[in-house]
């Protein structure tokens, strides 16, 4: 069937900010959908509140709304844009939920908008657990024994039937938020209450536990002609009980017989038909009893998903792109397979390699979080690796995580252990205990268990990891032991002092065979060096001299049955290299690797822009990245794609094959930046700002010299290499101080310390201070305003593109604070000084490309906090706000274009204001504090854009999921230092008609100043106290600021409760001030929406 | 250290790897199969007689060997080529490891070679003869042996795999252990039992099981059985099974089939389809590297629906443009209509008679291994028999 001609304009809903459970994969799918629909000649209207996405680039859609994804806003878009159809399946759970609400309130009918891809009934059948269960029963498939409950009593009575462990899942939440496994009555009651709260419909499912069953996912595509194909079967390394987003997953499925697989495939086809997803992709999860093959259907997502992004990258079959084409009426046999060119999309990819995805966690940033893996997703990112075998792919995946682990290292100091060596019995006992917990480190502990001789049977009983996977890990361990044995033998044989590892171990034909096998098994040079007590460089040199170079194979969807025309490559040690590099002028762009806190989609956005800019200039682009969620790892984003770990060895290998004119390290965040030096040493030209200039900005001592030379101020600071030195430096600077270890990303382990005892405990507990990583100590500027500046320079001209004023005070990590562009309170004189200083810094550092500077303004004084001569997290936000693609321009300057040639010599003066707000994962990680601080903890961001600051801020809050109240009661409890600032807030709130309540100290202060405030008890002061009020939802907004560490703990229940009740809360006085401005604005005028294209008419 | 093995091709290509399976030397035409599951079914598929099978999926043997997964009474592949064979299998039904199975069935194998390289080589240069040896370390000698092997074209491989004598088949897929029965297509209330005679050109047992599922009584006869003998059995339908090699090699069956067309409903599968094609007056040809896998898309020309099919053939039937100028083929039994075509290379995949009750496909509706999309064809065959009876 050809495409539909009755549709002209299609609305696409994005997934909003990056949160746990919804990350870049929806930018990838949304971008593919936008591009495809445009190519097919449709007008695309788009809404997404996340400015850091490629899909919200104004060129991608015809009308791009960066507005909160709420049902009210989307309905306004329907009213103004009158689309013919809505494609709800590309924006994750967010888009589905909004679509469901639109249908339920009659908006789709009112504006005559047709749902394409999946209709209301299908979405409902898949999402509503009861309906889904009934549908499965109807087609003869089993689902877990379960019951939907709306109160605790029903839950308790059903518990009698299912028994422990019991699964508790709230309905309609994403990433399994609020899901838990209860092993006892007390836990069960707690989890049921929590689930009923988190569910937007106050409903939860109690379910029989299938813990320990094997878990599988099938990605299914269907067209209007009822053709169905399975794109890829994925098997989880981790058994049922761990959320699939937190599981290591493997493609293709490894331990299914054909009969089992075909039964699953048949079931998947019947499910998509029964649910009635007309076109597009769905993800279906199955559990399989390892004892007898019993199969149970777990769930279905009637939309593209994280797994479909993974399956697309794993096979080369672009699910979202094809789903978009199917949604407008094409059938699978009418769509060409881009990769083979000669075949159609109507087939099932088959692969001749193994894909391993591994999740990346960030527990270390959340004090009080529980790192045990459960049915609620907790990971913040993922890496994927391809290899010819599982072992190779697995080891590549491990090093792709960038957790400073070069492979399957020992976590119990067993790297040189051989069976027969002395071993304290406490070691295996410790490992046994570790293995029992579903912890992110479990794969490493399993390897350690095998090293010490714990049997696979025992490990299987403790983990339910399939014996086949355990066997694979054992093979790696056995190989290590062979290698260690060989090394010891060499050491014994040699009497001279001159023996050089690796030469001695790998010498001779058997030695070379051993090295070849090591590489085929995926051992990194670094890991081999660790095992052999030598350096990675020595292994590399030896290897390059004596062994064939690594080879690259193509991802071709068909196991080599047809020629692959797309250079989508992965490394392996094979017989033939299919890289076939061109002789064109080319540039390698290094991506950002797995998402983590501090390094996310913003950097992928910049990398994608870099490749777009170079392609515009006719330069070949080569992307290197290992994050399967991203747009950058789409096979047609760049001319060539290497899906490889971003570590020195793997990147240098690519350079040796490609020999580019230069490499871009400044767009992918810290990951590629760390590689700048080794690359430069290997003679690869680094494009743009020199590695030396980067070092001048990063090295504290050189940076101080630089600032002094320019006559710029910075907070008093010092370096400490020991505890004693730290106390001396701090008392010299004067408390409070900000302390952090050097060379860290996203402010890891950064703290504000108010006195020496606190510093003492920080030094003792948090950080190991060494010569290599000294402790950095800075004066903490109280009540200062922080300012972020992004600039572009071509080495001569400097354009200050955006000056952003933070809402929260300096000291709150810039990645966590809200900010406004342009500044909403700074004077023109201050702004001018900031601009001048930025230009001076860029000139002095000879910046070519992007630069970000962070300033603090205290009174009339301007301090430089830090300079990052690279792409910053705010580049996409600034670009969307001013309507200039900064990263693209920066890339062009890096290959020799002047800003003058590019016609960008000054930033446009904005007539609107944009606010960036951060989004946090607090609800998912257990009992963590929500207080903002110098350690970054947000996972994503949203943008609110409007004519004034109040509305822009209001929109940013709505986009972040907080609805500011129009009326009601506000509870305040603030620290002494904030009391004066509260007066103005209280007056304005009172004028707006809010009822004010405050804890004693705050109330007394405000009462004295003539405000009408009702005192409430603190938790310690008896009941009812303010937490009771919050629990009873008697407050519509909570303000809580705290000073000393002890008061943090006392007031934690206030903040946690507000969070759990989803009541807006503010933990800084600046935050509530902005919120009050927003409430005032919302009172004064009603919501207006406007697409980006109207903000920046071309 | 593991024992070494060498694979040599007739064109001089040599790969060294590790010995797998029975220790010895084997030869045959090297073909690659892209299915990701089903190695046991493949090893026991008589269609692989004369061939050494390379699996493109890198891990083979993971789920071991289970009794229900055999597709015939023994293994037939001459040799087995994989990237990595699992040391220890993991599956609730598994009774043996792949290696043990290969040893038991005296199949010589090789692992630890770059199978992607070899696949690309075969794709570019076409299928060719090869030798796997664990015992001869002389590469030149092995290449010479490979070079000297006869081509499979024109050879009667069917004669080596067909049954010696007629037998009845009773097992359906419903007799499998619980949680295995995947087809979901078992005909619950057969209106009457039809007798089907199956010409065994190298039949896969799942064809027989699917016929039993459809409520048929199944009698399997040797490939050389005469039409007269079949007529004497008075079956309701005749099925021409899959099998190895070139249909020309089994041309002795052609006159008997010509005799049966139009007399009773006939269904052809794979080699059976090709032999039927010869009977209808069409010619066959050899494909460059054949179709071997479980992901081949086939378009139903009537409904425009696509089936993902299991395929395993080196030869195909050609419809010359003259013969199907109007899309139809004239035969002594009336018009025949091409019903299915490969989406990958437009190879003819299915035929039906307009007047004669004949249904024939190049691919494997019995799957095993592979998708069940085409399982409905057995229902169509049954419907033909019902109609013939009405």
Image (spheres, rainbow, N blue to C red):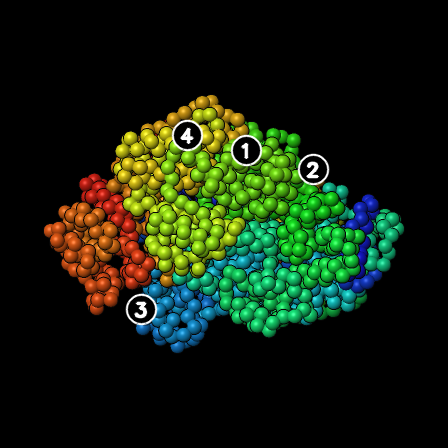
User: What is the chain letter for disc 4?
Assistant: A
As measured in the structure, the alpha-carbon distance from the residue carrying label 1 to the one carrying label 4 is 21 Å
Q: Nearer the viewer, mark 4 or mark 2?
A: 4
Badge 1 vs badge 2, beta-carbon distance below 8 Å: no
Q: Residue furthest bottom?
A: A160
Name the residue carrying label 2. Answer: B322
Image quarter where the C terminus of chain A lies is top left
Q: Residue at x 39, y 52 (%)?
A: A751
Name the residue carrying label 3. Answer: A151
Q: List x then y, in percent, for residue A1024.
A: 20, 67
User: What is the chain letter for disc 1?
Assistant: A
Q: Are marks 4 and 2 on the same chain?
A: no
Q: Residue at x 54, y 55 (%)?
A: A358
Viewed as shown, does residue A237 lie left or right of A709?
right
Badge 1 vs badge 4, beta-carbon distance below 8 Å: no
Q: Residue at x 13, y 51 (%)?
A: A1009
Q: Residue B87 lies in what quarter of the image?
A: bottom right
Q: List x then y, in percent, for residue A324.
A: 47, 43
Q: Is residue A89 above or below residue B102?
A: above
Q: Secondary structure at mark 4?
A: helix
The first of marks 3 and 4 along the sequence is 3
């Amino acid at each position: 069937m050809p495409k539909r001609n009755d549709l002209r304009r299609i609305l696409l809903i994005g997934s909003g900010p990056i949160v746990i459970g919804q990350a870049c994969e929806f930018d990838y799918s949304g971008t593919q959908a936008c591009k495809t629909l445009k190519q097919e000649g449709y007008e695309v209207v788009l809404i997404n509140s996340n400015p850091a996405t490629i899909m919200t680039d104004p060129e991608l859609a015809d009308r791009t709304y960066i507005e909160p994804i709420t049902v009210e806003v989307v309905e306004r878009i329907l009213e103004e844009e009158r689309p013919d159809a809505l494609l709800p399946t590309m924006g994750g759970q967010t888009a589905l939920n909004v679509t469901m609400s639109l249908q339920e309130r009659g908006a789709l009918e009112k504006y005559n908008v047709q749902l394409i891809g999946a209709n209301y009934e299908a979405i409902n059948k898949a999402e509503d657990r009861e309906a889904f269960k009934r549908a499965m029963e109807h087609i003869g498939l089993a689902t877990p024994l379960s019951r939907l409950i709306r109160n605790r009593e029903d839950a308790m009575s059903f518990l009698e039937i299912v028994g422990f462990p019991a699964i508790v899942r709230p309905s309609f939440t994403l990433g399994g938020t609020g899901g838990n496994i209860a092993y006892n009555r007390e836990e069960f009651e707690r989890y049921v209450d929590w689930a009923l709260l988190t569910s937007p419909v106050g409903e939860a499912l109690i379910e029989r536990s299938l813990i320990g069953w094997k878990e599988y996912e099938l990605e299914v595509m269907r067209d209007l002609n009822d053709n169905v194909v399975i794109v890829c079967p994925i098997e989880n390394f981790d058994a049922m009980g761990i959320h699939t987003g937190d599981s290591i997953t493997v493609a293709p499925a490894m331990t299914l017989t054909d009969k089992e697989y075909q039964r699953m495939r048949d079931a998947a086809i019947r499910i998509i038909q029964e649910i009635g997803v007309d076109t597009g992709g769905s993800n279906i999860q199955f559990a399989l009893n390892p004892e007898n093959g019993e199969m149970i259907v777990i769930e279905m997502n009637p939309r593209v998903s994280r797994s479909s992004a993974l399956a697309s990258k794993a096979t080369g079959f672009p699910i979202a792109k094809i789903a978009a084409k199917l949604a407008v009426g094409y059938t699978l046999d009418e769509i060409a397979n881009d990769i083979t060119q000669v075949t159609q999309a109507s087939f099932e990819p088959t692969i001749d390699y193994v894909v391993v995805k591994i999740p990346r966690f960030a527990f270390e940033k959340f004090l009080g979080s529980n790192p045990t893996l459960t049915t609620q997703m907790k990971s913040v990112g993922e890496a994927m690796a391809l290899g010819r075998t599982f072992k190779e792919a697995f080891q590549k995946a491990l090093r792709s995580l960038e957790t400073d682990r070069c492979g399957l290292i020992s976590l119990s100091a067993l790297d040189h252990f051989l069976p027969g060596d002395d071993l304290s019995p406490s070691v295996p006992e410790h490992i046994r205990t570790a293995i029992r917990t579903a912890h992110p480190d479990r794969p490493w502990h399993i390897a350690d268990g095998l090293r010490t001789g714990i049997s696979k049977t025992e490990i299987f009983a403790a983990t339910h990891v399939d014996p086949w996977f355990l066997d694979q890990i054992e093979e790696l361990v056995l190989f290590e032991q062979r290698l260690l044995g060989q090394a010891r033998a060499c050491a014994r044989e040699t009497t001279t002092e001159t023996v050089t590892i690796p030469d001695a171990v790998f010498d001779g034909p058997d030695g070379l065979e051993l090295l070849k096998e090591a590489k085929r098994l995926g051992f990194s040079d670094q890991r081999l060096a660790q095992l052999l007590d030598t350096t990675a460089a020595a292994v590399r040199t030896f290897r390059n001299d004596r062994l064939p170079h690594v080879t690259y194979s193509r991802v071709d969807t068909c196991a080599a049955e047809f020629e692959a025309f797309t250079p989508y490559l992965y490394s392996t040690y094979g017989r033939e290299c299919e890289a076939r590099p061109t002789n064109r002028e080319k540039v390698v762009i290094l991506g950002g690797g797995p998402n983590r806190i501090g390094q996310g989609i913003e950097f992928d956005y910049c990398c994608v822009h870099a490749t777009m800019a170079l392609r515009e200039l006719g330069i070949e682009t080569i992307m290197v990245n290992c994050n399967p969620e991203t747009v950058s790892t789409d096979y047609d984003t760049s001319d060539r794609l290497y899906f490889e770990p971003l570590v020195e060895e793997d990147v240098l290998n690519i350079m040796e094959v490609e020999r580019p004119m230069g490499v871009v390290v400044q767009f992918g965040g810290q990951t590629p930046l760390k590689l700048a030096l080794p690359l430069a040493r290997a003679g690869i030209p680094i494009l743009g700002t020199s590695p030396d200039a980067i070092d001048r900005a990063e090295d504290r001592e050189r940076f101080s010299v630089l600032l002094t030379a320019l006559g710029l101020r910075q907070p008093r600071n010092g370096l400490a290499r020991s505890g004693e030195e730290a106390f001396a430096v701090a008392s010299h600077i004067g408390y409070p101080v900000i302390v952090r270890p050097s060379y860290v990303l996203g402010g890891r382990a950064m703290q504000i310390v108010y006195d020496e005892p606190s510093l003492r405990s920080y030094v003792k507990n948090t950080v190991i201070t060494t010569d290599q990583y000294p402790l950095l100590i800075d004066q903490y500027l109280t009540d200062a305003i922080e300012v972020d500046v992004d600039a572009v320079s071509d080495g001569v001209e400097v354009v200050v593109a955006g000056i952003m004023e933070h809402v929260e005070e300096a000291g709150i990590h810039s990645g966590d604070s809200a900010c406004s562009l342009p500044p909403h309170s700074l004077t023109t004189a201050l702004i001018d000084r900031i601009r001048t200083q930025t230009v001076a810094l860029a000139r002095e550092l000879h910046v070519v490309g992007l630069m970000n500077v962070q300033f603090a303004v205290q009174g009339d004084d301007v301090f430089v906090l830090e300079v990052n001569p690279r792409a910053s997290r705010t580049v996409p936000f600034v670009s969307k706000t001013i309507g200039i693609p900064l990263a693209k321009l920066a890339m062009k300057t890096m290959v020799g274009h002047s800003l003058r040639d590019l016609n960008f010599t000054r930033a446009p003066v904005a007539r609107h204001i944009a606010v960036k707000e951060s989004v946090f994962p607090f609800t998912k990680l257990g009992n963590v504090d929500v207080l903002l601080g110098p350690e970054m903890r947000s996972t994503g961001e949203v943008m609110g854009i409007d004519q004034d600051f109040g509305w822009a801020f209001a929109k940013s809050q709505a986009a972040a999921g907080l609805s500011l109240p129009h009326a009601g009661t506000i509870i305040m409890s603030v620290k002494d230092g904030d009391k004066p600032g509260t007066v103005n807030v209280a007056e304005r709130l009172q004028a707006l008609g809010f009822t004010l309540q405050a804890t004693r100290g705050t109330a007394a202060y405000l009462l004295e100043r003539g405000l009408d405030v009702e005192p409430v008890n603190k938790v310690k002061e008896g009941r009812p106290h303010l937490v009771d009020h919050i629990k009873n939802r008697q407050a519509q907004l909570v303000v809580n600021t705290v000073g000393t560490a002890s008061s943090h703990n006392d007031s934690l229940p206030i903040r946690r409760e507000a969070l759990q009740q989803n009541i807006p809360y503010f933990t800084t006085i600046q935050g509530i001030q902005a919120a009050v401005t927003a409430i005032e604005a919302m009172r004064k005028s009603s919501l207006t929406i406007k697409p980006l294209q109207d903000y920046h008419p071309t | 250290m593991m024992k070494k093995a060498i694979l040599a091709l007739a064109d001089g290509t040599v790969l060294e790897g590790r010995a797998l399976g029975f220790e010895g030397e084997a030869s045959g035409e090297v073909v690659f199969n892209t299915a990701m599951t089903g190695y046991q079914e493949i090893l026991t598929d008589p269609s692989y007689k004369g061939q050494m099978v390379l699996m493109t999926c890198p891990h083979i043997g993971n789920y071991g060997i289970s009794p229900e997964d055999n597709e015939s009474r023994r293994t037939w592949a001459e040799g087995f080529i994989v990237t990595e064979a699992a040391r220890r299998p993991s599956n609730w039904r598994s009774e043996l490891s792949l290696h043990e199975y290969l040893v038991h069935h005296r199949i010589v194998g090789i692992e630890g070679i770059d199978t992607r390289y070899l696949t690309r080589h075969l794709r570019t240069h076409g299928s060719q003869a090869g030798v796997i040896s664990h015992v001869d370390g002389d590469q030149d000698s092995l290449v010479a042996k490979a070079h000297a092997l006869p081509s499979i074209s024109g050879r009667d491989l069917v004669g080596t795999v067909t049954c010696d004598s007629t037998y009845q088949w009773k097992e359906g897929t419903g007799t499998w252990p619980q949680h295995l029965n995947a087809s979901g297509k078992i005909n619950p209330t057969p209106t009457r039992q039809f007798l089907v005679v199956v010409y065994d050109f190298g039949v896969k047992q799942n064809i027989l099981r699917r016929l039993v599922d459809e409520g048929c009584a199944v009698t399997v006869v040797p490939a050389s059985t005469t039409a007269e003998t079949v007529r004497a059995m008075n079956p309701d339908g005749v099925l021409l099974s899959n099998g190895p090699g070139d249909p020309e090699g089994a041309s002795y069956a052609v006159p008997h089939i010509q005799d049966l067309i139009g007399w009773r409903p006939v269904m052809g599968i794979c080699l059976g389809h090709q032999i039927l094609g010869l009977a209808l007056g069409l010619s066959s040809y050899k494909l460059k590297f054949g179709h071997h896998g479980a992901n081949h898309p086939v378009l139903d020309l009537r409904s425009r629906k696509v089936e993902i099919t299991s395929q395993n053939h080196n030869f195909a039937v050609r419809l010359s443009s003259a013969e199907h100028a109007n899309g139809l083929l004239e035969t002594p039994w009336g018009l025949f209509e091409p019903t299915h075509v490969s989406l990958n290379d437009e190879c003819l995949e299915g035929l039906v008679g307009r007047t004669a009750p004949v249904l024939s496909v190049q691919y494997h509706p019995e799957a095993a291994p592979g998708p069940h999309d085409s399982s409905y064809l057995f229902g169509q065959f049954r419907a033909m028999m019902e109609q013939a009876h009405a």
